[in-house]
Image (tube, helix red, strand yellow):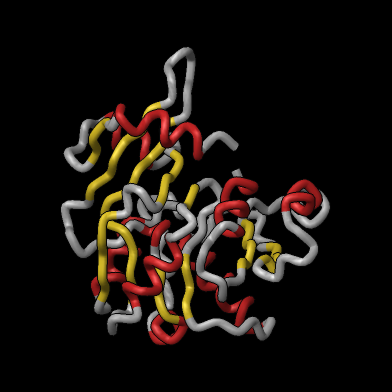
Amino acid sequence: MCIRAIRSFQAQSYESRQLLIWDSSGRNLPYDMYPRLRPQIDADDRAVIAYALNPDTTGRKSIGALRNEALETADTAGIPYDLVAHWDSDDWSASGRLTDQVHAITRDYEATGYNTMTFWREPENGRPGEAWRYSSQDAQYCIGTSLMYWRDTWKAKPFPDMPIKGEPRVSGAEELGWQLSMKRWSSPGTVFMIASVHTDNTLCKIAAGMKEWNRQPELDKWAAERMRL
């Protein structure tokens, strides 16, 4: 899954980009995971310039705390940047995603993202893979995995460290509160991103039949081809 995300990043049409890999598993990743990723990263690819190990082994840090730590690491390392784009390890992004979001945020917004996105439910127990569309009921809400914001915006408004109902990895409420404090632009991102369905977050919402979720069989083949890695 990480390889898919890295390849999507390398394929971006927006040239001025850098990838910071920030892991929260608590494993000894420089010796475990990173060597498996290294063959996927061209030695001359300056887009992937940094790798940071998160030493947290408790698994109890909130999404907000982890995001703040990653950006603080970038600052400490002296990595030059003006904009931050979230790039989850199990997502696919179209080659024009960063260009699309940069064009949007430079129209005097503090943050941008997608309020509609394709999700891919992996095949399981004989059931074929399924494409779903999530559409937020709040037209201005930016789905967390699609967020882009200015470095200065994050500096002035760091993510809240707010575990939710004993589940520190869940980020919806803290993200929403953070977003409400700023001027943001949201737009449909169905063709720009595909996110994986997880049993501990999105899958339960799909199963519950929430109105934000709609099955998209016409996108099954398209999504399967892009999520193949």
Quarter of the N terminus within the rendering? top right
**Which residue shows up at 30% across the image and 29% down it?**
218
Horizontal relation, residue 214 to residue 94: left or right: left
Taking depth in this image into account, of 65 and 213 the one nearest to the observer is 213
Could you tell whether 173 is left or right of 64 in the image? left
Along the viewing direction, whichever of 112 and 14 lies nearer the viewer: 14
Which quadrant of the view contains residue 185? Answer: bottom left
**Does 53 appear above or below 81?**
above
Asked whether the viewer can see residue 50, the reply is no
Q: Place residue 147 in its image quadrant.
A: bottom left
Is residue 56 depicted above or below 154 in this figure? above
Residue 174, position in %: x, y? 34, 64
In percent of width and height, residue 28 lies at 77, 53
Q: Give the farthest residue toward the top.
A: 126
Give the residue displayed 48% in from the left and 15% down from the top. 125
**x and y percentages locating residue 119 in the rendered image:** 38, 40
Q: Report the quarter where the C terminus lies.
A: top right
Which residue lies at the image location 61% right of the left edge and 52% below the top edge?
7
Residue at the outermost front position? 13
- Residue 73's place in the image compared with 86, above or below, is below
Q: In percent of the image, x 42 and y 29: which residue is there? A: 221
Residue 154: image quadrant is bottom left
Q: Is residue 108 left or right of residue 120?
A: left
Q: Is residue 168 visible?
A: yes
**112 left or right of 195 in image:** left
Count of numbered tags: 0
**How far across and how far down the image is residue 97, in percent?**
43, 60
